[in-house]
Every structure is written in structure tokens, then in C-alpha cells.
């Protein structure tokens, strides 16, 4: 999944997962379905009171007035719900500024205004092409408004990070893990998971050899390569969890 990377004022790098094209299309379909249902509701409501039997100009005038909120549905809901329409809420995606903060009304207005061009006039072709080709998954409206759409779905569980469940009194067997950065530890986790999933002893052996080189330590003969890697990951967490 592509990511939106930003640097805060404190020079801290933060990553957001960009919403997938599929989730954005489904969210749009949900919103469009709601709009269509509202149009039909208004039509049948007026028809049920025989409004259609009288002056047709009056009928269409009232119809336009009643359905006006549907025309601004996306703009109204994104502004009210902080970057989410009903469809976006269901799909757990959200419009944000490129710095990760909440967009303002004028940015939502830019997205909504240009949706006429990149969605409605081109049947979504321009929007899809722009989302696929742009670095931050932006359609024309996003580029104009300096926004993007991120996913709010958690992609990692606690067990998917270097912060494995350990006890406070967990003994650190390899203090040399101080030579591993958080990025190194995450790489170790990913490689180990690959070796485990594939049941590939070769990958695991290569990982152990690399850890021995970087940490300048030899894993005990009584400890299996699998246990050695797990111990290294737990030691790393125990050493850095309070820092």
C-alpha cells in the first residue's frame, strides 16, 4: 500500500497509508446510491400528494429545491464530518491535507468543484488516471485543494511490530542488540516472518549470520536459529521500550 509521508515541525517523520483506489470507488458508489435514493424519495413524495398532476413547472421547481442538499452532499458531509462522507466512513477513509492535518472548507470546496470535471464529465476516467499516476494518490480536485485521501484502517497488530509481548523482568541475553536500530529490528521481523511462512531454513540461516555480523556475537549452540532470532527481537524491545 502506498504511503503519504510527512515531516512534522519537530522533524519527526510520520507515515499514513493512502486509501486504495478500490476503497475510494466503493465509497463513491455508496454515496451515489444514497443520493439516488434521496432523489427517488423526493420524487415519490411529491407524486404521492399529486403535485405532479398540476403545474409541471411548479413540480420541478419544488423538486429542485428539495434535492438541492443532494447536489452538495459530498461538500456538506466532508465539511461536517472532518473529511468523511457516509461512504468514506463505512470504508474507513478520510480526506486530509498533505501535511496530515484536517482540511478546511475551501479545500473541500475545491475537491467538490473539480469533481464535475474529473468525475462527472469524464465518468471518473480522469480521476482514476490521476489517482493511479500521482505520487500521493490525488485526483485533480485533490491536487487543487492540496489534499489526499488516507486509510484509517489499522494495518499492523501489536504482533506485527518489533514490540513483542514481553514481561518487565525479561532477561536480556544479548545486550549487543543496542547496535540494531528500530529500522533494523523491523527488517529482522519481516525477514523472520518470511522465513517462517515459507518454512525456508536458508533465509533463517542467512538472517542469523547477518545478526551475528552486525551485533558481533555468536549465538549459543544450545539455542536454535529460530530461538536466537526471537530472543534478539525480545531483547531489542526490552532494551528500548522505556526510552
Image: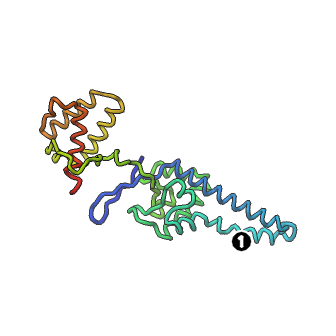
Q: Is residue 80 above or below residue 159?
A: below
Q: The C terminus is located in which quarter?
A: bottom left
Q: Is residue 234 left or right of residue 64?
A: left
Q: Which residue is found at the position 25% from the left and 39% from the top?
A: 230
Q: Which residue is found at the position 78% from the left and 62% from the top?
A: 44
Picture coordinates of residue 217 (x, y %)?
Answer: 12, 37
Q: Is residue 20 left or right of residue 70?
A: left
Give whichever of 161, 151 is nearer the camera: 161
Give the color scheme: rainbow, by chain, secondary structure or one colour: rainbow
Residue 159 falls in image quadrant: top left
Q: Is residue 201 above or below residue 82?
A: above
Picture coordinates of residue 165 (x, y %)?
Answer: 29, 47
Mark 1 residue crowding within 10 angstroms, few (<14) / some (14–19) / many (20+): few
Q: Is residue 131 left or right of residue 216?
A: right
Picture coordinates of residue 135 (x, y %)?
Answer: 41, 52
Give whichever of 127, 89 is nearer the camera: 89
Q: Which residue is found at the position 39% from the left and 51% from the top?
A: 3
Secondary structure under tag 1 reads helix
Q: Which residue is found at the position 80% from the left and 72% from the top?
A: 58
Q: Which residue is mark 1?
A: 65
Direction right: furthest residue: 53
The mark total stands at 1
Give whichever of 170, 151 is nearer the camera: 170
Picture coordinates of residue 142 (x, y %)?
Answer: 48, 60
Q: Is residue 164 above or below residue 84?
A: above
Amino acid at each position: 500500500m502506498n504511503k503519504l509521508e510527512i515531516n512534522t515541525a519537530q522533524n519527526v517523520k510520520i507515515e499514513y497509508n493512502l486509501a486504495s483506489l478500490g476503497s475510494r470507488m466503493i465509497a463513491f458508489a455508496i454515496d451515489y446510491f444514497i443520493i439516488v435514493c434521496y432523489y427517488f424519495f423526493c420524487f415519490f413524495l411529491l407524486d404521492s400528494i399529486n403535485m405532479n398532476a398540476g403545474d409541471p413547472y411548479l413540480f420541478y421547481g419544488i423538486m429542485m429545491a428539495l434535492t438541492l442538499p443532494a447536489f452538495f452532499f459530498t461538500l456538506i458531509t466532508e465539511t461536517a464530518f472532518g473529511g468523511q462522507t457516509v461512504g468514506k466512513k463505512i470504508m474507513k477513509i478520510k480526506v486530509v491535507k498533505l501535511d496530515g492535518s484536517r482540511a478546511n472548507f475551501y479545500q473541500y470546496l475545491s475537491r467538490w468543484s473539480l469533481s464535475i470535471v474529473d468525475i462527472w464529465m469524464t465518468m471518473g476516467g480522469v480521476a482514476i488516471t490521476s489517482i493511479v499516476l500521482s505520487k500521493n494518490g490525488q485526483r485533480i480536485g485533490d491536487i487543487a485543494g492540496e489534499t489526499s485521501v488516507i486509510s484509517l484502517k489499522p494495518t499492523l497488530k501489536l504482533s506485527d511490530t518489533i514490540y513483542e509481548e514481553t514481561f518487565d523482568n525479561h532477561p536480556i541475553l544479548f545486550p549487543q542488540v543496542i547496535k540494531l536500530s528500530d529500522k533494523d529490528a523491523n527488517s529482522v521481523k519481516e525477514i523472520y516472518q518470511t522465513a517462517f511462512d515459507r518454512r525456508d531454513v536458508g533465509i533463517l540461516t542467512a538472517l542469523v549470520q547477518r545478526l551475528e555480523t552486525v551485533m558481533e556475537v555468536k549465538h549459543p549452540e544450545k539455542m536454535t536459529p529460530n530461538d536466537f532470532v526471537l530472543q534478539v527481537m525480545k531483547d531489542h524491545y526490552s532494551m528500548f521500550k522505556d526510552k
